[in-house]
Image (cartoon, rainbow, N blue to C red):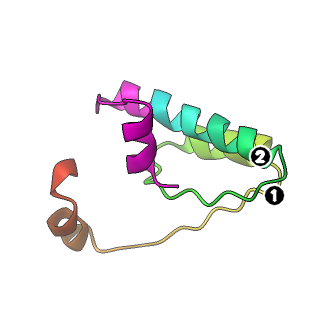
Amino acid sequence: ISGDDLRKLFNYDKFSKKARLVYAMSYGKFCKYIADRNINVIFATVSLFDKVRKWNKLNINNYIEIYIESDIKKLMNKKKKFF
């Protein structure tokens, strides 16, 4: 599941810092809901908030976080919508 897909599914169309935090928390809760039913979830998102990652670690069983470091210039060229 990608963050872009969930934004479309739930009609999330705001990009302020506050809105992104609300969305990120709802993504974690959505993944927890699925994982609590013994379904594996792979969710790809850009995580901007430590608060969200900490919540995920504390609340989602078998939570695994993968950090991918990338060149910001390459990201800016690829994902023009963010910059």
Inspect the magenta stretch and tell me whether residue 30 lies in it: no
Q: Is residue 13 above or below residue 28?
A: above
Residue kind at label 2, given as amino acid type: Ile
Q: Which mark is residue 37?
A: none
Q: Is residue 77 above or below residue 17?
A: below
Give residue 58's position: percent from left, percent from top. 78, 43
Give residue 41's position: percent from left, percent from top. 67, 57
Q: Which mark is residue 60?
A: 2
**Magenta-colored span:** 1-21
Residue kind at label 1, given as amino acid type: Asn
Inspect the magenta stretch and tell me whether residue 17 lies in it: yes
- Cβ–Cβ under 8 Å for marks 1 and 2: yes
Q: Nearer the viewer, residue 16 or 33?
A: 33
Q: Is residue 39 above or below residue 75?
A: above
Label 1: which residue? 62
Q: Secondary structure at mark 1?
A: loop
> Within the image, what quadrant is residue 26 found in?
top right
- Point 29% across, 74% down: residue: 71
- Point 74% across, 56% down: residue: 63
